[in-house]
Image (cartoon, rainbow, N blue to C red):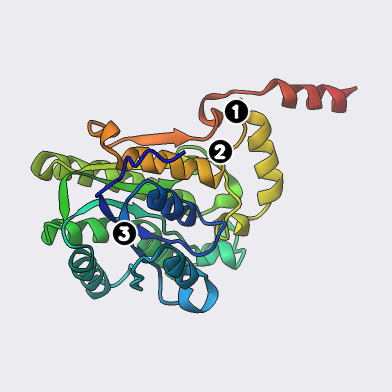
Amino acid sequence: MAKNILQGKRGIIFGALNEQSIAWQVALKCHEEGASFVLTNAPVAARVGQTEALAKQLNAPLIYADVTKMEDLENLISQSTAQLGGKLDFVLHSVGMSLNVRKKIPYTELNYEYMHQTLDISAMSFHRLMQVLWKHDAMANWGSIVGLTYIAAQRVFPDYSEMAEAKSLLESIARSFGYHFGKHKKVRVNTISQSPTKTTAGSGVGGFDAFFSYADKMSPLGNADASSCADYCVSLFSDYTRMVTMQNLFHDGGFSFTGIAQDLMENFKDQSN
């Protein structure tokens, strides 16, 4: 049940491609909680995604932007503050793409031009976005910026490939820019390390279904779904978390701190008999 904890707040939500997207669920939850916001996505999403339908459903402005282009982000921020009528209280960065993963290129044989694109789109874009927000003084005091990440930034998941490096960089940027944003503008910056989630991007990782099942058994609470992640995002956008910043927050049902699950142990015992 909505509590209107985002009533009067303004924001930008990146990456709502379709109903499976975490950003899509975040948009629905923010709308329920009383926020007004701009939806944004890469121009290619106009052909392959359903963002326009969501924008119409929520009566939200939609502004396409290529996160690798400063001019696109400058336009996005200036138009968003103008259309929303003031500074921003929250921003969600839900952006990631790897051509090496899409093309199933082994980690030991990465194409470095593709890797540059991966880091640019998936991580450097977070710094680029915050730099534009900083220069435009577009964030309201005690505003909140959130990026989505994954535990492969800390641990090895072979099929996640170079996206592990991208997420490591994303988290480092959150800490470093979070210091400056907090010190000078009272804005918080955090990342959420989410369970494997059946999104368009997540499902493109090799062996995803098997790993999804493994993580679900490893996690005491099971995998966190996109809707519950959206709830967590809303809490970070709200005034209840004003003193939380520069953190990488695990939202994974306990997976990140579980050594072994009894269910899996029983499976191994069965196989050894």
Name the kind of residue labelled 1 in the image.
Leu
Give the percent coordinates (x, y) of residue 257. 52, 25
For the point 54% across and 40% down, the residue is 195
Residue picked out by circle 3: 37
- The answer to whether residue 81 shows anywhere in this view is yes
Name the kind of residue labelled 3 in the image.
Phe
Give the percent coordinates (x, y) of residue 152. 50, 43
Residue picked out by circle 2: 224
Callout 2: SS: loop
For the point 70% across and 40% down, the residue is 213
Closer to the chain start, of discs 1 and 3, is: 3
Give the number of the mark in front: 1 or 3.
3
* Above/below status of 122 relative to 241: below
Gap between marks 1 and 3 measured at Cα = 32 Å
Q: Residue furthest left?
A: 184
**Circles 1 and 3 in contact, beta carbons < 8 Å:** no
Residue 221: give its label. 1
Quadrant in the rendering for residue 263: top right
**Circles 1 and 2 in contact, beta carbons < 8 Å:** yes
Residue 95: give its label. none
For label 2, count other residues whose C-alpha is less than 10 Å away and answer few (under 14), some (14-19) or many (20+): some
Closer to the chain start, of discs 2 and 3, is: 3
Gap between marks 2 and 3 measured at Cα = 25 Å
Quadrant in the rendering for residue 130: bottom left
* Above/below status of 83 relative to 181: below
Name the kind of residue labelled 2 in the image.
Ala
